[in-house]
Image (cartoon, rainbow, N blue to C red):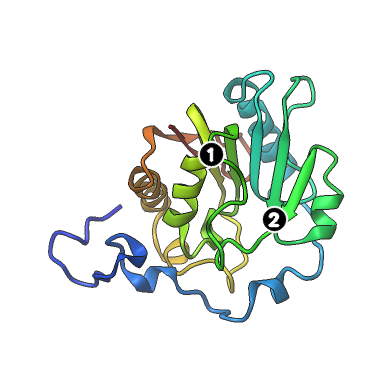
Amino acid sequence: MHDQASDGEGIDDSDDHYGLPGAWFVCADESADEDFYQVPRLVAHVDEGTLAALTDFYLSFIPAKADVLDLMSSWISHLPTDVSLGRVVGLGMNADELAANEQLDEWSVQNLNQQPTLPYDHDSFDIALIVVSIQYLRRPIDVLLSVHNVLREGGSIAIAMSHRLFPTKAIAAFQSLTVEDRMSLVRYYLDKAGFQDINLLDCSPPNADPLWIVTARK
């Protein structure tokens, strides 16, 4: 990510964006997110090869018996079916999508752009996941601060990204920055939220949609 803080130009001095430009966090459609997500979308947002690569990544990333939080979840969580997990909890925007997700033990609906604090106890989960959705968060560091709180010590987060998005709802930064700068931006989010051991991974399979994953540990 290009360092804009060094010359002070374009920086929002308020605490809302933790030193990042406020203009990065606007989107074309300022209407309520609840309206946009009211109709369930029971579709895959990247192709099958990419989803298979994501599931393969989870095989090595998620330990057996782990309690998993799937943030910004939908009708499928892409978790491996041959690993015995603990509690799997989903939080998303559409009740019909979440109810259709057979991998979730429980779920809740919450607009993280309006309420970034998660409704879970401190030290509740071993793993947190965000799949092709980080680009919609307008208060991402506040959300990740709450993720840090609900993860147990030594717990990990994986934020998966690709090149597809809803252009009217994705923040401006994800529509103007390069892939490298987007990944660096997510690294910045995680660093500001207190995470350690941040890694930027290119897990893209051949002849499929790209898959970039940023991981970190509490």
At 49% from the left edge and 35% from the top edge, which residue is drawn? Answer: 202
Any part of residue 42 in sight? no
Classed neighbour count for the residue bearing mark 1: other residues with Cα under 10 Å, few (<14), some (14–19), many (≥20): some
Determine contact: label 1, label 2, CB under 8 Å: no
The disc at residue 80 is none
Return the residue at label 1.
122
Label 1 is placed on what type of residue? His
Label 2 is placed on what type of residue? Gly
Q: Is residue 185 above or below residue 8?
A: above
In the image, 2: left or right of 188? left
SS class, disc 2: strand
Q: Single out the mark in the foreground, 1 or 2.
A: 1
Return the residue at label 2.
92
Q: Is residue 52 above or below residue 101?
A: above
In the image, 98: left or right of 185? right
At 44% from the left edge and 48% from the top edge, which residue is drawn? Answer: 145
For marks 1 and 2 on the same chain, the one whose residue lies earlier in the sequence: 2
Residue 122 in picture, x, y percent from top left:
53, 39
Any part of residue 4 in sight? yes
Residue 146 in picture, x, y percent from top left:
49, 48
Residue 137 in picture, x, y percent from top left:
52, 61
Classed neighbour count for the residue bearing mark 2: other residues with Cα under 10 Å, few (<14), some (14–19), many (≥20): many
Residue 77 in picture, x, y percent from top left:
73, 41
Report the residue that reaches farthest toward the left: 7
Q: Label 1 to label 2, Cα distance in Å?
A: 20 Å
Along the line of sight, the residue nearer the viewer: 117 or 213: 117
In the image, 212: left or right of 40? left
At 67% from the left edge and 18% from the top edge, which residue is drawn? Answer: 64
Q: Quadrant of residue 68?
A: top right
* Image quadrant where one finds the C terminus: top left
